[in-house]
Image (tube, rainbow, N blue to C red):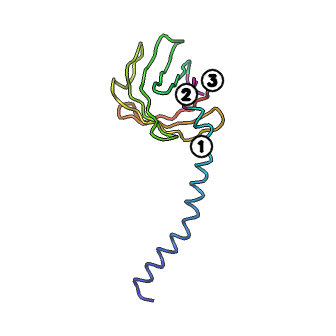
Amino acid sequence: MPKRLGSLYFYWMKFILLLPLFVAAASCSAQNLDPDCLARIRKGVFVPEQAGPMEVIRTGKEYVEVYNEGDAKLFHAIRWDNDSTFTLTMKRSVNVLTCLKKGEIMKTTITTCQGNRYESKSISLYCGDTEESFVKRK
């Protein structure tokens, strides 16, 4: 077998052997994102599983973080990029010290969504990376 055909054969066989692994990994991650759950979490009131007294109120165009039973709030505009990713743009804060300033963005990806619970990863230039779990309350 010529050298060139041998190397093509090697890469083709490698592709054939690795393809099932990629398909299996993709199907596992897709199972963690229930489409009905993704539709339910677009709007509502959410509480974090591990943080203190805070809730998130998400409407069609606004994302509000409420602290201390309403004494402190962060207001963001929300834009859904697809079913599992949204972008928050900081609008204003009331009695909250935050790493975001007006107009700065935070990109959030939902990594797991089942029932009324979801996990997400957020990335921001000024706040860094965070991971959180939320439960829908209303």
Q: Residue at x 59, y 49 (%)?
A: 30
Instruction: Choose the circle earlier in sequence order: 2 or 1.
Output: 1
Q: Which residue is mark 1?
A: 33
Give the crowd class for mark 2: few <14, some 14-19, many >=20 residues within 10 Å: some
Q: Residue at x 42, y 16 (%)?
A: 96
The stretch in magenta equals 42-51
Instruction: Choose the circle earlier in sequence order: 3 or 1.
Output: 1
Where residue 137 is drawn, which disc sits there? 3
Q: Which residue is mark 2?
A: 43
Q: Which amino acid, mark 3?
A: Arg
Q: CA distance from mark 2 to mark 1?
A: 17 Å
Q: Which amino acid, mark 1?
A: Leu
- Mark 3: which secondary structure? loop
Q: Quadrant of the N terminus?
A: bottom left
Q: Is residue 76 above or below residue 4?
A: above
* Residue 131 position within the rendered picture, expressed as x and y whole percent measured from the top left: 51, 35
Left or right of 54 in this view: 93: left
Q: CA distance from mark 2 to mark 3?
A: 11 Å
Numbered disc in front, either 2 or 3? 2
Left or right of 34 in this view: 80: left
* Residue 14 position within the rendered picture, expressed as x and y whole percent measured from the top left: 51, 71
- Mark 2: which secondary structure? loop
Query: Is residue 44 magenta-colored?
Result: yes
Q: CA distance from mark 3 to mark 1?
A: 19 Å
Front residue (pair 16, 126): 16
Q: Residue lying at the far bottom in this picture: please name it.
A: 1
